[in-house]
Image (spheres, grey):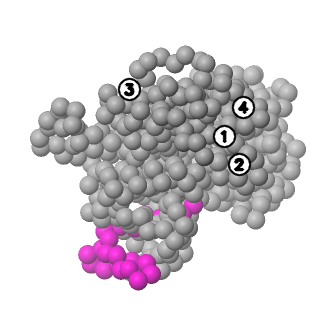
Amino acid sequence: METFDLVVIGAGPGGYPCAIRAAQLGASVAIIEREQLGGTCLNWGCIPTKALISGAELYSRISDATTRGIKATGVAIDYAALVAHKNRAVEQLRNGINQLLHAHGVKQFSGTARFVDRTTLEIKSADGTARLSAKKVVIATGSTSVMPAFLPEHPRVVESRAFLGMEELPESLLVLGGGYIGCELACMAAQCGVKVTIVELLEDILLVLDPDVRREVRTHMEQKLGIRVMTGRSLDSVAADGSGLTCKCGNDTLHVGMVLAAVGRRPVTDGLNLEAAGIKTDERGFVRVDEFGRTNVANIFAVGDVTGRVQLAHYATAQGIAVAETVCGQKPRKFESVVPCVIFTSPEIAFVGLTEEEARKQNRQVLTGKFRYSALGRAVAAGETSGFVKWIVDPETDQLLGAAAVGPHATELIAEAAVAVRAELTATELAHTIHAHPTFGEMWMEAAHAVHGQCIHAPPRRKK
């Protein structure tokens, strides 16, 4: 039985960076993966969706390019070819992870891991069973889609992973769930010409966002993409027939070609035999960890979606690196608290730090500064004028507490805001920082000036 300083279970965006960082620090490391390197993010999540969204977005922009002097005829989307591009991108990145693990001396095991005890792991694979001894273990097994029990088992009723594996889109699609996964895939399908309906039980879609951001996105989805958004409604039943699916939603009867369930995710812990190691989980089955990634068992840690914290790949990576350094004897480092979130809807959305809604719930007073794309020279020149950026500011200290962006390139723009919030910069400091012209990034400077009513390229605030 081989012995390692660290064994990582799961080679997704939390697991493989953890393994590599520990190896960089001199540890002997093994990693166990039962499916594909890169986990859900690379194979059935972040990367595949963005590959498809990029193609759908390009098709949409070409189809609407006449206002910018571009005439294109016969433009069509070949979805099977777009899927092939997606598959090539995934394979290229997966091979890159494999090479990185080899280069850092991380030993890979393919199979399903289970705890025998707190320091012994058993791996079952097609080749048989093997055992490893581990001084420290990191659980990084991720999460998977939830499929509501009332939905029928049918090829036309899918969750996100199955949807991303299709080589042909239906003519019509009902998306159950108005969270970021459902809305991203709804926008992608609509841009490809699919008739899309979103059904959300709660009062609005994307409820993690402030109302003004939600309103901007929903208006675009409904008016520009033709998506029907049904909120505050339940999907009561789904029945399959020869031509598709019949869905009952209150008094409405919808006939669609496919139903995509996007109602949440659950932890992947099946087969791990956590009880044998004495690991505690919460009421939803997520592995309990503290702010350093430590479970209730001294030598076992957990990172990423399986912990039930913020379910984002980049957060899992940051957690994995922090835990690797702790495991290897460095001063324990808490998980980062400033975590940017990006949503690849049309338009794009991004936010970081405190929102206005969160501030209100905490009974905090805040100032805001907002600047619209339509007032920005670069955006007008590019014909990309929908949306805005916004700062959330402490009125007493002028500290930047949070930011949001909705519009073209929002997912790239948020990086500056994340640095500013993490560095505890003030609105005045950001406003006095010269931003190159003409760029989209200038909006952050303009919005910082707007906090105190000093924005040059916006009309003055109305006096109350």
Which of the 4 image quarters holds residue 144? bottom right
Residue 374, position as x, y percentages in the image:
39, 36
Amino acid, disc 3: Arg
Foreground of the two, 258 or 249: 249
Between the C-alphas of marks 4 and 1, the distance is 10 Å
Q: Which badge, 2 or 1, comes first in the chain's sequence?
A: 2
Foreground of the two, 58 or 394: 394
Q: Which badge, 3 or 1, comes first in the chain's sequence?
A: 1
Whether residue 242 appears in magenta in the rendering, the answer is yes
SS under mark 4: loop
Between the C-alphas of marks 4 and 2, the distance is 14 Å
Q: Quadrant of the N terminus?
A: top right
In the rendered image of this protein, does residue 160 appear above or below residue 24? Answer: below
Residue 425, position as x, y percentages in the image:
69, 26
Between the C-alphas of marks 2 and 1, the distance is 10 Å
* Residue shown at 44% from the left, 55% from the top: 218
Residue 422, position as x, y percentages in the image:
70, 30
Find the residue positioned furthest to the bottom: 251
Amino acid, disc 2: Ala
SS under mark 2: helix
* Residue 359 disc label: 2
Which residue was labeled with disc 3?
A: 378
Q: Nearer the viewer, mark 3 or mark 1?
A: 1
Amino acid, disc 1: Leu
Residue 209, position as x, y percentages in the image:
57, 51
